[in-house]
Amino acid sequence: MKIDKELMKGSTAVLILKLLEREDMYGYMIVQKLRVCSDEIFDMKEGTLYPMLHNLEKAGVIESYWCDSDEGRRRKYYKMNSKGKEMLKRKQEEWNIFSKAMDSILGDGLNEH
Amino acid sequence: MKIDKELMKGSTAVLILKLLEREDMYGYMIVQKLRVCSDEIFDMKEGTLYPMLHNLEKAGVIESYWCDSDEGRRRKYYKMNSKGKEMLKRKQEEWNIFSKAMDSILGDGLNEH
DNA sequence: CTATATACCTAATAATTCTATGTATATTGT
DNA sequence: ACAATATACATAGAATTATTAGGTATATAG
C-alpha cells in the first residue's frame, strides 16, 4: 500500500521538509505554521513531531543548532541540507502519485476498467 | 492529525467502500480491482483487507453472503448498506479536506501566511 | 504432479501516531 | 502575589494501522 517507507512516516515528514525548505524553523514553530497554513486541519502533536525531527536528523537530511530567543526558553532550529532537498523532491512526487491514485478510485476512474 | 478515526483506517476503508458502492464484491476481487484501477499503485495486502472487511461488517456498514462460483472455491461477497453509504460520503469529504490541506502546504500555500 | 492462480483467514510483528507526562521560562489576568 | 496560559523541548507507554508470514482449500496449466 505504501509507495515507499524507508525512513519516512506517512504524510507528516514531507510536510516538515516542505516547511524547512523555505526557512530554518524550530519545532514549536512548525506545529503552529502547519496548523495555520492548513486552516486548522493539521494539528500535529509534539509527541509526533519531536521524535520525527530527531529521526530526520539521524538520517542526515536535516541539521540542528540552538539559538537563544529574546523571550522564553531557547529554541532548537532545524535546517534542511542537500540530502533533505532530494528527499523532499522524491516525497512530493510520491504524494502526487498517491493522491492521483486515490482520486482515480474516488472519482470516476472505476468506469474505465 | 487524523480528521476522524472512529472505526476507519487510513485511506484503505474509503477505497473499499467506494468499490462496493458500484457492485457487490468479494475480497480477492477488491484487491485486484484496486490494483488495476490505480495503475498498480495500490497493492493492498490480504492481511490488510480481510480483517478490515470483518471490522466493517461488525460495525454494520457492510453485509456479506456466500456464493458458489463456477470455478475455484466459493466466494464471500460484500454488500454496502445505507449506513455504509453515509460513511462513504463522510469519508470522501474527509479525503477531500485532507488532500486540499496537503496541497495547500505542498503547493504555494506557504506564501499566504 | 507440480506450480500457479484463485480464494479465504489469522497470528505475530512492524510501523506509525497519539496520549500523557515531565522539564523549564515568560506573560497575562486576578 | 499567584494561578493560568503560552512558549519550548523531550520521552515513555499505549493505541492504531498495516504488513509479513503462515495456514487452508480448489482448480487449471504446463
Image (tube, coloured by chain):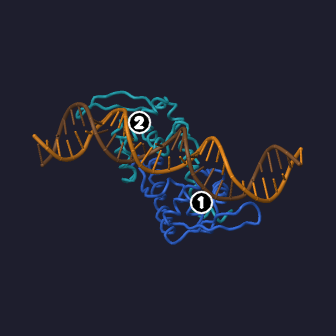
Chain colours: A blue, B cyan, C orange, D brown
Which subunit holds the residue at mark 1? Answer: B
Tell me the CA gap for discs 1 and 2.
34 Å
Amino acid type at image mark 1: Ile
Residue that numbered label 2 is attached to: B51
Q: How many marks?
A: 2
Q: Is residue A42 visible?
A: no
Disc number placed over residue A73 in the picture, else none: none
x and y percent of residue B69 in the render? 26, 32
For label 1, the SS is: helix
Tell me whether marks 1 and 2 sit on the same chain: yes
In which quarter of the view is residue B26 placed?
top left
Q: Which quarter of the rendered picture does the C terminus of chain B lie within?
A: bottom right
- In the shown orientation, is residue A70 left or right of residue A56? right
Amino acid type at image mark 2: Pro
Give the vertical position of C11 relative to A95 (above or below).
above
Q: Are marks 1 and 2 in contact (CB under 8 Å)?
A: no
Disc number placed over residue B105 in the picture, else none: 1
Which subunit holds the residue at mark 2? Answer: B
x and y percent of residue A21 in the render? 58, 68
Give the vertical position of D16 relative to B73 (above or below).
below
Give the vertical position of D17 relative to A3 (above or below).
above
For label 2, the SS is: helix
Please name the residue shown 31% across and 28% down the image. Answer: B67
x and y percent of residue C15 in the render? 45, 51
> Callout 1: few (<14), some (14-19), or many (20+) C-alpha neighbours within 10 Å?
many
> Callout 2: few (<14), some (14-19), or many (20+) C-alpha neighbours within 10 Å?
few
Please name the residue shown 53% across and 58% down the image. Answer: A13
- In the shown orientation, is residue D26 left or right of residue D9? left
Mark in front: 1 vs 2: 2
In which quarter of the view is residue B57 placed?
top left
A59 and A89: which is toward the camera:
A59
